[in-house]
Image: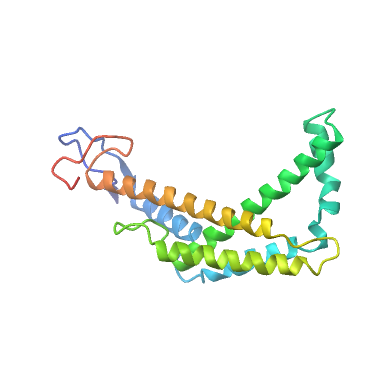
Amino acid sequence: MRSLAGSGPGILGGAVTIRPLGFRRARSNFHDMIFLKGKFPPWIPVILWMTFIFWGSSDAMSAHHTSRFLIPLIKWLFPGVSPHLLGVIQHLIRKWWHVTEYAILGTLVWNALARPFVVKPAGWPWKTAGLTILICALYAASDEFHQSFVPSREASVVDVMIDICGSSTGLAAVWVFGLWRRARRWRRGCGMPVASDQGCVGGGQ
């Protein structure tokens, strides 16, 4: 059995797309798996990622150990780089990783606190966003406290600020993605092609 995945040619001449129902179910199941819906506990990925960050704050991922593969890689990408610039690039890469890992953490915490993974019509839930950043900030502070006991690492308030910026970046990505999904659903509800920029005829503007 087949079904229509869009409206037929109407006032705006929307294209008709016919897809098997099985394809739609498979896509829905894949979406639920990616965004951790269903019966899978949403806090499990958060705990696993926090554990990974905790491991990364150990001696295993100190500047001394990461330089063993970062420095050869930088020299390969930029032959003839000066020792000073080499150190600056390595430092920036490590700070960039701070932003990345906490952007991922912010996304996972958001997914656990505010489901489904979409900006609701009522607007952006600021309280949930604030709680997400607070959780990430507290974990970042505890992570730096953990590093103060590792001989090859050191605690830094600056790193906590960078981590908070990373979690905020993750939330910004969630917000943009949610707006995109909301606009996409609205256009489909109007019976319009997703790529169209025209308004909905006879629908809510």
Counting every numbered tag in the picture gives 0
**Quadrant of residue 155 within the rendered picture:** bottom right
Which residue in the rendered view is the most extreme toward the front?
157
Say if 21 sits above or below 139 in the image.
above
The structure residue drawn at horizontal position 74% and vertical position 60%, both measured from the top left corner, is: 56
**Side (left or right) of 183 relative to 58:** left
* Res. 45 in view: no
Residue 101's x, y, as percent? 63, 55
**Colour mapping used in the image:** rainbow
The structure residue drawn at horizontal position 37% and vertical position 56%, both measured from the top left corner, is: 119
Say if 140 sits above or below 16 in the image.
below
Give whichever of 161, 126 is nearer the camera.
Answer: 161
Say if 101 sits above or below 17 in the image.
below
Residue 26's x, y, as percent? 43, 54
* Res. 190 in view: yes
**Quadrant of residue 150 within the rendered picture:** bottom right
Which quarter of the rendered picture does the C terminus lie within? Answer: top left
Which residue in the rendered view is the most extreme toward the left?
202
Give whichever of 85, 65 is nearer the camera.
Answer: 85
**Side (left or right) of 100 relative to 25:** right
**Side (left or right) of 204 relative to 60:** left
Residue 55's x, y, as percent? 74, 64
The structure residue drawn at horizontal position 33% and vertical position 45%, both measured from the top left corner, is: 184
The structure residue drawn at horizontal position 27% and vertical position 49%, both measured from the top left corner, is: 3
**Side (left or right) of 52 relative to 104:** right
